[in-house]
Amino acid sequence: MLLVFSVSSNESSKSAYILAGVSVVYMFIQYSCAIEDKNNSEKVFNSLPISREAIVLSKYAAVMVFAILDIVLLSAISYIVARTGFMGIQAIGIIDVITILFTISILTGAYLPIYFKFGYIKAKILNIVLFLGFFSASMLVGQLLKHFKGSKILYSTSEGALGHWLTILGDQGVLMALLCIGLLVMAISSFISVAFYRNREFS
C-alpha cells in the first residue's frame, strides 16, 4: 500500500491529487459519523424496523458514493487545470484513481469496524493515529525509495520475487490486483463491522 502511494507521488501534482482525493472522502466519512453521534442517530435507527446489517452496509455504500463523486469532481478540476497549462500540471490518470480507491478502501476498511464496535468518540483517537500515521509512513517510504533509487539494494529487490510477479502481471494486471485487494478489504471489513454492531449494546 505504501509502495503504491509513494510511486504514484513522484510528481507533486500527482501527490496532490491522491492526497486531496483520499482526504476529502475520509473527512466526509468522519463528518457523517460525527453528525450521527451528535444527534444520537444510532438510537433512532435502532428504534426503527431497520436491521443492523442494513445500517452498517449503508455506511460502506456511503464510502463508495463519496469516492465516486470525489473522483468525478477531481477529474473535472484536474482536466480544467491541465488545459490551462498552469505549471505544466497534468490531468489525473488511471493510476492515481486506482491509488485513491485503494487507499480509501484500506483506511475506511480499518476504521469502520472500530467505529461500529466502540462508537465515534472512542474511535476518534484511532482515526487520528491511522490518518496521520498512514501519510507520514507514505512520505517516509517515498523518501527511502528516492534515496535508494538505482542502488543495488533496490535493484536486487526489483529483480526478486516481487519484480518477477509485477512483470508477469503487467500494468493492467497490477491495477486490477489493487482493485480486487481493495474490494476484498472492504468486504472483510463489512463482515467484521456487521458482527461487531449486532452485539453492540446502547445505553
Image (cartoon, helix red, strand yellow):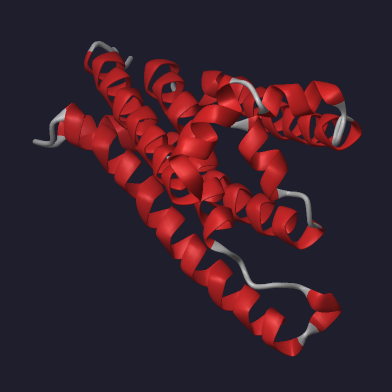
* Front residue of 196 and 78: 78
Q: Residue at x 70, y 80 (%)?
A: 81
Position in image of residue 188 (x %, y %)? 31, 23
Position in image of residue 126 (x %, y %)? 60, 21
Compared across the picture, whether 116 is left or right of 47 comes to right
Name above or below for residue 186 compared with residue 32. above
Position in image of residue 196 (x %, y %)? 30, 15
Quarter holding residue 83: bottom right
Name above or below for residue 18 compared with residue 86. above
Q: Residue at x 63, y 26 (%)?
A: 130
* Front residue of 195 and 178: 178
Compared across the picture, whether 76 is left or right of 134 comes to left
Q: Quadrant of the N terminus?
A: top right
Position in image of residue 92 (x %, y %)? 61, 66
Q: Residue at x 60, y 30 (%)?
A: 163
Name above or below for residue 48 compared with residue 24. above
* Front residue of 185 and 25: 185
Compared across the picture, whether 93 is left or right of 151 comes to left
